[in-house]
Image: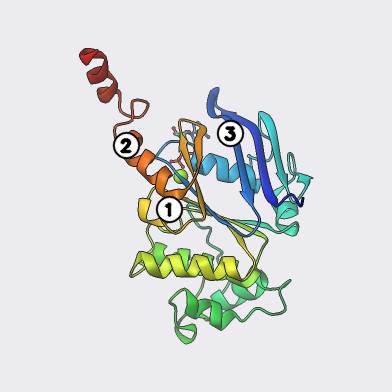
Amino acid sequence: MKDNRLLEVKNLKYSADGKEIIKGVNLDVKEGEIHVILGPNGAGKSTLANLIAGAVGYEEPTEGEIIFDGKLLNGKPIYERAKLGLTIAFQEPARFEGITVEEYLKLSARNNPDANIEECLRKVGLEPCEYLHRYVDESLSGGERKRIELASIMCMKPKLAVLDEIDSGIDFVSIDEIGNLFKTMRDEGTTLLVITHRENIANIADRASLMCDGRIVETGNPKEIIKKFEKECLTCTVQNPEVLKEINLNK
Ligand code: ADP
Ligand code: MG
């Protein structure tokens, strides 16, 4: 049987400044799926995303393995992972002084001869004639930068895209709009690992994982994961000491 796991994260641990942030994450992402990681603020979602992508300072986990397309990624810098077909949209997208949107998207599309950069811009709701000549700097709003980041990933068409809260700060008209975009990307061959704390984004996933306190506590059907998130995270004893106090008092 073909092993369709595109990404395997095994017993991953990561500490920074003497604090353990990722405490033994196990996660599989299957080829061709939209996999959502749902979890409260501070759960370690961005740290996990940075470790998977090999962001600067996150190339080497403290423990564990990250395997992508059968290759061990530990220690590899971000550009080597990108060459293998793994890309990330950071929670805070980078700015590139002196580069226009057109140049930025052309750079993203350099290994994808089928890319149509104008089409990618339209898909994220930006009119090419208004944006192609703008600069990818602080003159763009946060939402516009996130849309351009998404367009850049569509131009690149990687095997796996890690999208860290691409939905926050983006003024998409509706969840349907962003959900349809994710589905188009998936159907065109990009596996998606979508990080969010919004339940309605998790609804469009093929599978979902719940992250809490540096661990993936469950993976499965998105509906079940959302239920667990609502039931357990909103009254979380790890993130809300007050709730823990109350539970102890009622024991
Ligand atoms: P999330 O994306 O789920 O909101 P993060 O991965 O950003 O969570 O952060 C998880 C926890 O780790 C937070 O408590 C955060 O303050 C802490 N953290 C993140 N980066 C560092 C760092 N470089 N040094 C110390 N603590 C950090
Ligand atoms: Mg985050």
From the image, tell me which residue sits under label 3.
25
* Residue 55 at least partly seen: no
Instruction: Using the rendered view, name the quadrant where residue 239 is placed.
Output: top left
Disc tally is 3
From the image, tell me which residue sits under label 2.
231
How packed is label 2: few (under 14 Cα within 10 Å), some, or many (20 or more)? few
Q: From what the image shows, is residue 165 above or below residue 209?
A: below
How packed is label 1: few (under 14 Cα within 10 Å), some, or many (20 or more)? many
Q: Position of residue 17 (x, y in %)?
A: 54, 26
Q: Is the C-beta of the residue carrying label 1 under 8 Å from the nearest atom of ligand 1?
A: no
| Residue at image location 75% in from the left, 58% down from the top | 83
Query: Is 13 or 67 nearer to us in this picture?
Result: 67
Q: Position of residue 196 (x, y in %)?
A: 43, 50
Kind of residue sitting beneath label 2: Lys
Q: Is the C-beta of the residue carrying label 2 under 8 Å from the nearest atom of ligand 1?
A: no
The reply, left or right, for residue 248 in relation to residue 17 is left
Q: From what the image shows, is residue 219 above or below residue 173?
A: above
Precedes in sequence: disc 1 or disc 2: 1
Query: Is 124 or 235 nearer to us in this picture?
Result: 235
Kind of residue sitting beneath label 3: Val
* Residue 195 at least partly seen: yes
| Residue at image location 29% in from the left, 32% down from the top | 235
The reply, left or right, for residue 248 in relation to residue 219 is left
From the image, tell me which residue sits under label 1.
202
Q: Is the C-beta of the residue carrying label 3 under 8 Å from the nearest atom of ligand 1?
A: no
Please identify the quadrant where the C terminus is shown. Answer: top left
